[in-house]
Image (spheres, helix red, strand yellow):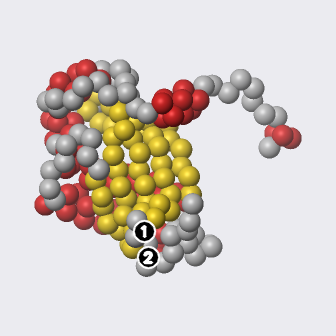
Amino acid sequence: MNLIWRTLLHFFLSRRRSTLGPFDVSSTAFRVLPTDLDTNRHMNNGRYLSISDLGRLDLLRRTGVYATLMRNEWYPVVQSSSMTHRKSLMPWQKFEVESKVSGFDDRAVYMEQRFVVKGEIYASIVLKARFLKRTGGTVPMNELVAALGFDAPHTEPAGWVQRWAQDAALPSTRQPAPSEW
């Protein structure tokens, strides 16, 4: 709930920005606020994930995907994600979240997002997302692409993204005992 004002702001700002194609990069500007900080006085690692949601919202709105999702009563969910932190974002520092779809397969959409300061990548996220129906079940990718009207060929994500997605989907073969934690 503490991102409600940022969410509303970016929801309305995205309407005024240029439209994007399905594989274009969305770049959304932010600033590290005092409410984003942890006890180390840099942006909290959980806040990166929350702000990345706003970057995806901007991309969904500007590509027209958001309107189609609302019309069909579908919604996106992150199935898996991995994040790499390279440098800390400090109080009041300006940064941009760059978001792009890297590809999709018959079940999911793969995205990459970067937190960038003056051209330097501070953190990056790779994620796998699915689309669900409010009435229950998943939206088949061919149905989603058809509803969006994208004239895009089936675009497989990069090889390393596919390998990451396979590893992320593997169940743990053995649960560690509490003494192993």
| Label 2 with label 1: CB-CB less than 8 Å | yes
- Mark on residue 4? none
For label 2, the residue is 93
- Tell me the amino acid under the disc marked 2: Gln
Determine the residue positioned at 40% across, 70% down.
118
For label 1, the residue is 117
Circle 1 Cα neighbour tier, 10 Å, few/some/many (<14 / 14–19 / ≥20): some
Residue at the extreme bottom: 92
Measured along the vertical axis of the image, is residue 64 above or below residue 139? below
- Would you say residue 135 is visible in this rendering? no
**Quadrant of the image occupied by residue 116:** bottom left
Judged from the image, the secondary structure of the residue bearing numbered disc 2 is loop
- Would you say residue 89 is visible in this rendering? yes
Residue at the extreme right: 179
Determine the residue positioned at 35% across, 50% down.
99
Q: Position of residue 84 (x, y in %)?
A: 56, 52
- Tell me the amino acid under the disc marked 1: Val
Judged from the image, the secondary structure of the residue bearing numbered disc 1 is strand
Left or right of 100? Residue 164 is: right
Left or right of 86? Residue 64 is: left
**Rendered-image quadrant of the N terminus:** bottom left
Determine the residue positioned at 37% across, 27% down.
156
